[in-house]
Amino acid sequence: MQIPSQATMRENAKIQYQIDIPDLDFETAKNQVKTWVTQTYGTAMILSWKDGIAGKSYPTFECGNGKINVPPWVYYARTRGSNLTVEVNGGDYIFMILIL
C-alpha cells in the first residue's frame, strides 16, 4: 500500500476502546478494532501493537539506534505517521494506526 504524504498531517488521537467480551484474546481485539476504525475513519492500517497481557509487541526489532526513550514498537509507528492510538480495555491491547 502506498501512503500519501497528507496522511501524516492528521492530528494524533488517543482513544480508549472497551470490548466487553469475557476472556478477550489478541486476535479478537485486533479484529474488533480494525472493524471499528475502518467503519469510523475509512482506510486505515495497523502499524504496530502491544499485547499487554502476553507481554508481546510488534515490531520486535530495535529501532532508532538504541537512542530513543520509547519502546521500539511506539517509535516504529510514530516514524511511519501513526495518527491514532487505540487502547483496548485500559491497555490490555494497544494498536497504533495510520488513518489515510
Image (cartoon, rainbow, N blue to C red):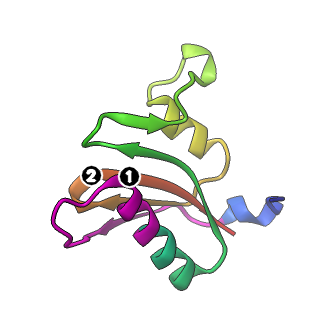
Q: Quadrant of residue 87?
A: bottom left
Q: How packed is label 2: few (under 14 Cα within 10 Å), some, or many (20 or more)?
A: some
Callout 1, which amino acid?
Ile
Q: Quadrant of the N terminus?
A: bottom right
Residue with the mark numbered 2 = 91
Vertical arrangement, residue 65 with respect to residue 31, above or below: above
In the rendered image, residue 62, in percent from the top left (x then y), is placed at: 56, 21
In the rendered image, residue 33, in percent from the top left (x then y), is placed at: 43, 68
Say which mark, if any, is on residue 17.
none
* Residue occupying image coordinates x 15% and y 66%: 22
* Residue occupying image coordinates x 79% and y 59%: 3
Magenta-drawn segment = 10-32
CA gap, disc 2 and disc 1: 6 Å
In the rendered image, residue 95, in percent from the top left (x then y), is placed at: 45, 54
Q: Is residue 22 magenta?
A: yes
Indicate the secondary structure of the residue bearing disc 2.
helix
Residue with the mark numbered 1 = 94
Callout 2, which amino acid?
Gly
In the rendered image, residue 49, in percent from the top left (x then y), is placed at: 46, 47
Vertical arrangement, residue 62 with respect to residue 34, above or below: above
Q: Are marks 2 and 1 in contact (CB under 8 Å)?
A: yes
- Outermost residue toward the bottom in this view: 39
Q: How packed is label 1: few (under 14 Cα within 10 Å), some, or many (20 or more)?
A: many
Q: Is residue 79 magenta?
A: no
* Residue occupying image coordinates x 41% and y 57%: 27
